[in-house]
Image (cartoon, grey):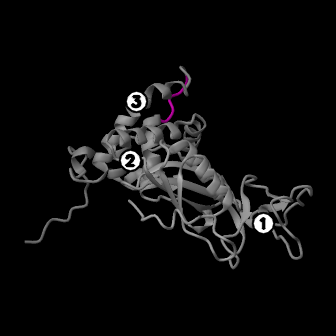
């Protein structure tokens, strides 16, 4: 028998978002963990907001929305607001009811910046890490560090000479720029739209772009991140950040730190040994002598 195909929508819905989400959905245990962390951070949220005025976006909802953006690789906050408007799973995770209006993207961005300025994101990360430590999910013995390039939201046309005032553009939307014969470097040039971005290239055969560098320290037992940092792009940025992360996030001496051959330098190996951390680095013997002596390659790898 053919089913009915009426287009008239009902006036009320008696099913809540909680009932629509499957009980075995992977976001359910994650929501439980996040709620416990947010409950502990709630006293700190109050210090970031005034006692009077118009209510802003609840910090708990804002942090859950930002977590969704990371988990589902949503490329922009504008698209995140669009998804929150009609995606029941996202509404449930953030804590929005079916009829709750979605925030304007500019309002969401301003409130997000308040949390970043208040170092709430770092406190949230530390609280999650404390949960993992209480559940014995961290080994505190074997770690891995690596870095990645993060392309800045700035075009090469904005990379201008610091001492020369820019000429009025012929087209404000897409100005004509001629860099032919001009030698550009981070010492003499700077982006007019993102001054902290640095000109960098991934390799000898790659083109130079404006980048930042992200760095993460991972624990080997369950592959959990125990430290992270964002820096300006540079030739030694990976090793400098790795030294800082190792000093602040590796809690015991005689731990091991694994990394690729880009970290095989005398200075970085000396930094790790001064911290009591054994460097398990891939040896770089292409253009120079490896800084790793016979002790490390002769030791069987452990997990």
* Residue placed furthest toward the right: 164
* Residue placed furthest toward the bottom: 205
Figure check: 112 above or below 79: above
Q: Which residue is mark 3?
A: 40
* Residue drawn at x 11%, y 71% as measured from the top left: 2
Give me the disc on residue 280: none
The quadrant where residue 174 appears: bottom right
**Majority SS type along the magenta span:** loop
Q: Is residue 91 left or right of residue 174?
A: left
Question: How many neighbours does mark 3 have within 10 angstroms: few (below 14), some (14-19), or many (20 or more)?
Answer: few
The secondary element bearing badge 3 is classed as helix
Q: Nearer the viewer, residue 115 or 144?
A: 144
Q: CA distance from mark 3 to mark 1?
A: 46 Å
The range drawn in magenta is 53-57
Q: Position of residue 189 (x, y in %)?
A: 84, 60
- Mark 2 or 3: in front is 2
Q: Position of residue 301 (x, y in %)?
A: 42, 64
The secondary element bearing badge 1 is classed as helix
Q: Nearer the viewer, residue 246 or 202?
A: 246
């Amino acid at each position: 028998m053919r089913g009915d195909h009426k287009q008239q929508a009902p006036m009320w819905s008696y099913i809540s978002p909680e009932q629509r989400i499957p009980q075995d959905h992977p976001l359910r245990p994650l929501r439980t963990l996040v709620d416990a962390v947010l409950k502990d951070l709630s006293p700190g949220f109050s210090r970031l907001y005034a006692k009077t005025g118009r209510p802003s976006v609840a910090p708990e909802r804002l942090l859950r929305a930002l977590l969704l953006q990371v988990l589902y690789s949503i490329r922009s906050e504008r698209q995140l607001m669009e998804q929150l408007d009609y995606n029941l799973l996202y509404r449930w995770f953030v804590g929005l009811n079916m009829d709750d209006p979605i925030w304007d993207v500019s309002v969401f961005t301003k409130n997000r910046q308040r949390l970043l300025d208040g170092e709430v994101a770092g406190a949230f990360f530390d609280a999650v890490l404390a949960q993992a430590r209480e559940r014995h999910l961290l080994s505190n013995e074997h770690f891995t560090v690596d870095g990645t390039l993060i392309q800045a939201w700035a075009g090469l046309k904005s990379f201008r000479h610091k001492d020369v005032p820019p000429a009025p553009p012929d087209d404000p939307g897409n100005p004509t720029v001629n860099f032919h014969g001009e030698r550009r470097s981070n010492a003499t040039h700077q982006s007019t739209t993102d001054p902290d971005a640095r000109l960098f290239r991934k390799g000898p055969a790659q083109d130079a772009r404006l980048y930042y560098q992200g760095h993460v320290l991972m624990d080997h037992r369950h592959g959990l991140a125990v430290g992270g940092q964002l820096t300006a792009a540079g030739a030694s940025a990976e090793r400098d950040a790795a030294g800082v992360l190792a000093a602040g996030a590796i809690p015991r001496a005689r731990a091991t730190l694994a990394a690729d051959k880009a970290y095989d330098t005398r200075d970085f190996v000396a930094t790790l040994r001064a911290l009591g951390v054994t460097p398990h680095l891939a040896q770089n013997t292409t253009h120079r002598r490896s800084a790793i002596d016979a002790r490390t390659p002769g030791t069987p790898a452990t997990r």
